[in-house]
C-alpha cells in the first residue's frame, strides 16, 4: 500500500507539502519565510512565454517575448518524513496563473496584512476565498504602525467569521511558528468539514 | 558552455537578441564584450540548454516533487550535458524541483526538462506531493506538520 520511494541508502524519500504566504508588496512575506526556514530563502524564476505557440525547434524562439516572475521560498524539514515548503507569492498580482501553481495542493495560505496599507491584501483574500483554499490573516505589526484592533481589521476585510485573524511579528520565530500552527489547525478543520460524504 | 556536438554555433548566435544594448560599446573593446552587460541576459538562453524543448519527455514535475539520485553512474554514453550532471550531483540528498531551480539558478521550465531526461535514463527517483483530494483525507499529515512546527 505504501508506495513511498527509497533512495539508494534505503531511506525513504520525504513527502513534501507546502504553505502559501501571500500579501501586498513589502508586507514582509520573504521576512516571514526566512524567519522560520532552516536555510536562507531560495528564489526560483518562472519563465513566461506564450505557451499557445508551439515550439518545434529553436527557430522562432528568439522572437518570443519572455518575462520572468520570481518566487521566494523556504524549507522546513520535519523529522526526515516530511518537508514543508513556504512559498511567497509573486508581488505582482497580474501573474495569477503563478498563484494557481503555487496554491495547487497547498495545505493553506497565510495572508500577511499591513494595517497601514490594508487594502493591499484584498486581492489575496479574494483569491483564496474564491478558490476555497483555507487561509488565515496575519497582521504584521510593523514598528510605529497603528495598532488596529483585530475586529477593526476583520470588519475592513469583511471576512467570514470562521477565518482566524492573528497579530504577528514576521521577524520573530516564535510568532511566525504560531501563525503557521494556527493556519494548519484551521486548514485541518476546514478540510474535515468539506470532506465529501461517500455514497 | 552547454553546446553539444550536434549543435552548430549559429544556433547560439541566433538565440541572442537582435537589438544591440544601448551605449555599451566602448572604443577598442572586443565586440563580444557588450554581451557581458547584465541587460544582455544569460549567455546561454534556457531554451538552448534544453535544445528548444519546453516539456519534459517523462513525468510531470510539481514545484515540490521531491527528487533524489538513484546512484546509477552517469556514464558518458548517456549523453548528459553539464546541467544534467549538476542536477544529479545536487540530488545526492532529496531535494524539491523548486530547490533545484533555486540552487542552479535556472528557470523551473528548464529544470523540468532536465529532470524528465534524467528520469527517462533512470538516474533519479521522484516522489510527487499529495493531491488536494488526498490532503482532505489525511489528518496525519496536518498533525505531523503541527508537531514539527512546534518543535522548531
Image (cartoon, rainbow, N blue to C red):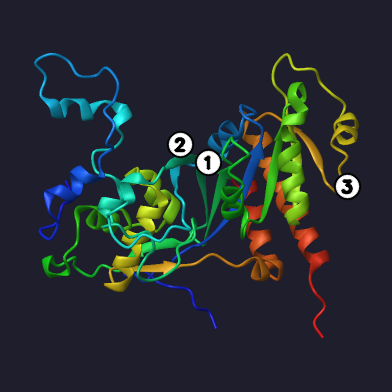
Q: Element type at marker 1? A: loop
Pointer 2: residues within 10 angstroms few (<14), some, or many (20+)?
some
Does residue A194 appear in this view? Answer: yes
**Please, which chain is the residue tagged with disc 2 on?**
A
Q: Is residue A4 left or right of residue B74?
A: right
Dot placed on the residue nearer the N-terminal end, 2 or 3:
2
Do the residues marked 1 and 2 share a common chain?
A: yes
Seen at 73% across and 27% down, the residue is: A114
Q: What is the CA distance from the residue labelled 1 to the residue labelled 3?
A: 30 Å
> Mark 2 and mark 1 in contact (Cβ < 8 Å)?
yes
Q: Position of residue B75 (x, y in %)?
A: 14, 67
Q: Position of residue B134 (x, y in %)?
A: 65, 71
Which quadrant of the figure has residue B111? Answer: bottom left
Pointer 1: residues within 10 angstroms few (<14), some, or many (20+)?
many
Q: What is the CA distance from the residue labelled 2 to the residue labelled 3?
A: 35 Å
- Would you place residue A183 above or below residue A8 in this image? above
Q: Is residue A76 left or right of residue B71?
A: right
Q: Mark 3 — residue?
A: A160
User: The C terminus of chain A is located in which quarter?
Assistant: bottom right
Do the residues marked 1 and 3 share a common chain?
A: yes
Nearest the eye: A169 or A123: A123
Q: Mark 1 — residue?
A: A37
Seen at 31% across and 73% down, the residue is: B120
Q: Element type at marker 2? A: loop
Nearest the eye: A145 or A83: A145
Q: Mark 2 — residue?
A: A40
Which quadrant of the figure has residue B137? Answer: bottom right
Q: Position of residue B132 (x, y in %)?
A: 65, 65
Amino acid at each position: 500500500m505504501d508506495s513511498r520511494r527509497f533512495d539508494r541508502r534505503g531511506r525513504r524519500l520525504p513527502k513534501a507539502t507546502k504553505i502559501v504566504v501571500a500579501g501586498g508588496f513589502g508586507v514582509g512575506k520573504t521576512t516571514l519565510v526566512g524567519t522560520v526556514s532552516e536555510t536562507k530563502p531560495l528564489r526560483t524564476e518562472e519563465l513566461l512565454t506564450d505557451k499557445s505557440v508551439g515550439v518545434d525547434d529553436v527557430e522562432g524562439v528568439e522572437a518570443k517575448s519572455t518575462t520572468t516572475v520570481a518566487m521566494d521560498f523556504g524549507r522546513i524539514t520535519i523529522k526526515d518524513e516530511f518537508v514543508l515548503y513556504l512559498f511567497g507569492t509573486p508581488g505582482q498580482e497580474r501573474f495569477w496563473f503563478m498563484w494557481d501553481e503555487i496554491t495547487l495542493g497547498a495545505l493553506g495560505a497565510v495572508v500577511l496584512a499591513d494595517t497601514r496599507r490594508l487594502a493591499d491584501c484584498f486581492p489575496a483574500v479574494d483569491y483564496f476565498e474564491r478558490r476555497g483554499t483555507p487561509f488565515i490573516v496575519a497582521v504584521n505589526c510593523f514598528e510605529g504602525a497603528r495598532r488596529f484592533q483585530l475586529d477593526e481589521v476583520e470588519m475592513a476585510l469583511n471576512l467570514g467569521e470562521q477565518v482566524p485573524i492573528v497579530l504577528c511579528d514576521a521577524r520573530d520565530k516564535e510568532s511566525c511558528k504560531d501563525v503557521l500552527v494556527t493556519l494548519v489547525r484551521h486548514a485541518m478543520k476546514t478540510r474535515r468539514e468539506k470532506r465529501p460524504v461517500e455514497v | 558552455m552547454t553546446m553539444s556536438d550536434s549543435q552548430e554555433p549559429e544556433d547560439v548566435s541566433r538565440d541572442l537578441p537582435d537589438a544591440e544594448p544601448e551605449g555599451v560599446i566602448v572604443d577598442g573593446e572586443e565586440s563580444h564584450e557588450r554581451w557581458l552587460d547584465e541587460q544582455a541576459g544569460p549567455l546561454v538562453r534556457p531554451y538552448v540548454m534544453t535544445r528548444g524543448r519546453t516539456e519534459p519527455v517523462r513525468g510531470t514535475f510539481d514545484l515540490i516533487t521531491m527528487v533524489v539520485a538513484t546512484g546509477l553512474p552517469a556514464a558518458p554514453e548517456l549523453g548528459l550535458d553539464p546541467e544534467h550532471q549538476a542536477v544529479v550531483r545536487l540530488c545526492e540528498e532529496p531535494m524539491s524541483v523548486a530547490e533545484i531551480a533555486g540552487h542552479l539558478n535556472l528557470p523551473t521550465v528548464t529544470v523540468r526538462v532536465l529532470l524528465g531526461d534524467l528520469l527517462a535514463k533512470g538516474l533519479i527517483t521522484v516522489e510527487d506531493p499529495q493531491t488536494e483530494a488526498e490532503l482532505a483525507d489525511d489528518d496525519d499529515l496536518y498533525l505531523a506538520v503541527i508537531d514539527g512546527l512546534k518543535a522548531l
